[in-house]
Image (cartoon, grey):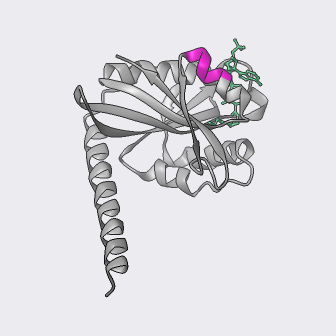
Amino acid sequence: MGITKMHDRLVTYLMSLKKLLLDTAGNFLVRQWKSIEKKDILSIEDSMLPEVLRIHDEGFENQSSDNLIKYSKNSGSIFYIIKSNDRIVGYCTYYLKPNLSLKGLEKQSVISSIAIDRNFRDRGFAERLLRSTIKEMKVNGVSSILLYVNVDNHPAIQLYEKIGFRIIKQVEDICGQKESCHEMELKLV
Ligand SMILES: CC(C)(COP(=O)(O)OP(=O)(O)OC[C@H]1O[C@@H](n2cnc3c(N)ncnc32)[C@H](O)[C@@H]1OP(=O)(O)O)[C@@H](O)C(=O)NCCC(=O)NCCS
């Protein structure tokens, strides 16, 4: 086997190992999770998935919902829905990851997806969903929340800025192929 091939294999192996370690640590952090009282906001159950997928597909045209299905089943994710009069009107999902910084080992969370039913937008549901779940992140010692948003998604950017997220940098190919996104962060400590 040539040197280049061996190097490529080693890099692939190390990346898989890193992912495995992060997933295991994330699952462990979620198992210790403390829930707080959140009005009209519940953890997802299997029976809610079809409605959540409908809201996802409406909010993200041409984007596969495979990851969302994975998150709903993955014990390392934190997945909430928000209701209005017993009807599911939106969802958001986070995953947890340990982050090694100069301050030591910190808990960081990443918002992997959020959407509100088109007929219920502009009524404060996303803001309520985020504010309540962020409160729960604080109770659980999460030090910062990250997210990635398409640079052209102005409603979402305004929502995140209203809540206190700040743009850190622009990244390519994370939200989708050939898409430019802002990485945004909310510091909690
Ligand atoms: C982005 C989204 C989640 C916002 O949900 P929402 O429930 O309508 O938002 P809220 O009513 O809670 O709005 C809260 C704040 O967000 C901002 N905002 C929301 N919609 C906006 C719009 N269309 N234009 C500008 N700002 C907007 C405003 O700052 C608003 O505060 P204000 O009402 O005091 O002006 C919703 O538009 C959606 O589901 N979009 C499709 C999926 C998506 O893009 N998700 C984000 C991926 S990163």
Looking at the rendering, which quadrant does residue 177 occupy? bottom right
Q: Nearer the viewer, residue 133 or 103?
A: 103
Residue 95 x %, y %: 41, 41
Residue 39 in view (yes/no): no
How many discs mark residues in the rendered view? 0
Residue 89 x %, y %: 66, 32
Q: Nearer the viewer, residue 168 or 165?
A: 168
**Would residue 88 appear left or right of 106 to someone viewing this image?**
right
Residue drawn at x 36%, y 67% as measured from the top left? 12
Looking at the rendering, which quadrant does residue 14 occupy? bottom left
Extreme residue toward the right, this view:
119
Residue 67 in view (yes/no): yes
Residue drawn at x 30%, y 27% as measured from the top left? 34
Residue 130 x %, y %: 53, 23
Residue drawn at x 57%, y 58% as measured from the top left? 66
Residue 54 covered by magenta stretch:
no
Extreme residue toward the front, this view:
3
**Would residue 139 appear left or right of 57 to someone viewing this image?**
left
In the image, the segment drawn in magenta is 158-163
Extreme residue toward the bottom, this view:
1
Q: Main secondary structure of the magenta part?
A: helix
Question: Which quadrant is the N terminus positioned in?
Answer: bottom left
* Location of residue 147 with respect to 162 vertically, above or below: below
Residue 64 x %, y %: 64, 56
* Location of residue 183 with respect to 49 vertically, above or below: above
Question: Which quadrant is the C terminus positioned in?
Answer: top left
